[in-house]
Image (cartoon, helix red, strand yellow):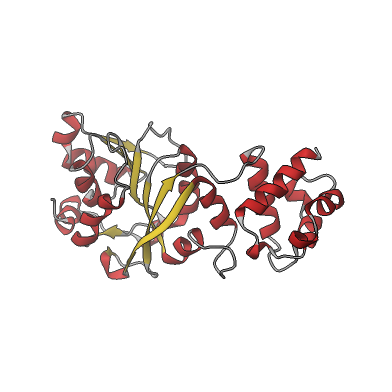
Amino acid sequence: MRDPDALIARAGLRGDPERDQHFLVDDRVLDRLPGYLPDSADTSHVLEIGGGTGGLTDRLLSVAGRVTVVERDPDLAAFLREEFAAEIDAGMLSVVAGDALEVDLPAFTASVSNLPYGVSSEIAFRLLPAGRPLVLMFQAEFAERMAAAPGSDEYGRLSVTAGHYADIEIVETVPKEAFSPPPAVESSVVRATPRPPDYEVSDDESFMSLVRAVFTQRRKTMRNAIRNTTHISGIDDPESLIEAAGEELMRKRAGNVPPSEFARLARLAAEQG
């Protein structure tokens, strides 16, 4: 495996916290990341968001049939093309220079990525609906909210929406010192194993809108949260929905409502038009 510090030296580029660049340089963490994919994962085409200087790219090439790296920094993208020229010529690697939120992503079979933390939420919710196994590095606090269970302090909109697409697990906590330059916070590795939800919704968009709406007023009861957020949820007749949902659900707060109950609420809203 290529040494991550040597890659940084050859690139002649330093990570820049102002540009959300923190290169993962701990060999042990880099070596472990591909192994966090589920045993059943198809690794014929692995997507990496934020290739940096290629420390993780190098590890992915050892386990994947093909790797596509998306790197928004043009200088880093140019370095990756030079450093991995042989792998590119062999058809094992493609380097896409551009923003992962704007470029067309390939039809990947799995993704292992050390995400830019400033846009990690947006990228995660671009990847999750694809229904592919993901191993993603996040800020630890974000990862905890993503994996949180109903009733916990961290449970919220992020927990419900991520869990709609996959089983979410934190598989490793990574210290600041594993990065160059070190970020201000600890990081965590999340594994997302895709599966259909154990409930039905009429459509994902209305379900997500309802969840987003009520969590803006998580300290209020569901009854009041529904009444106060129709401009977000698009619910035309909140009083009818409140009556149909029943007193037991309406007196709860959003942080204690499991995803299946949000789904039932979304179905009731759809039935009422």
Is 95 situated left or right of 242 in this image?
left
Count of numbered circles in the view: 0
Percent x, y for residue 17?
37, 62
Viewer-nearest residue: 102 or 46: 46
Question: With respect to residue 236, does 86 lie above or below?
Answer: above
Percent x, y for residue 137?
37, 56
Residue occupying the point 62% across, 58% down: 258
Viewer-nearest residue: 133 or 209: 133
Percent x, y for residue 2?
13, 51
Is 231 situated left or right of 103 in this image?
right
Residue occupying the point 70% across, 57% down: 214
Question: With respect to residue 88, does 79 lie above or below?
Answer: below
Residue occupying the point 36% across, 67% down: 183
Question: With respect to residue 167, does 247 lie above or below?
Answer: below
Q: Quadrant of residue 47?
A: top left
Is 177 situated left or right of 190 in this image?
left
Is 214 situated left or right of 85 in this image?
right
Percent x, y for residue 262?
67, 52
Query: Which image quarter is the C terminus in?
Result: top right
Q: Quadrant of residue 199?
A: top right
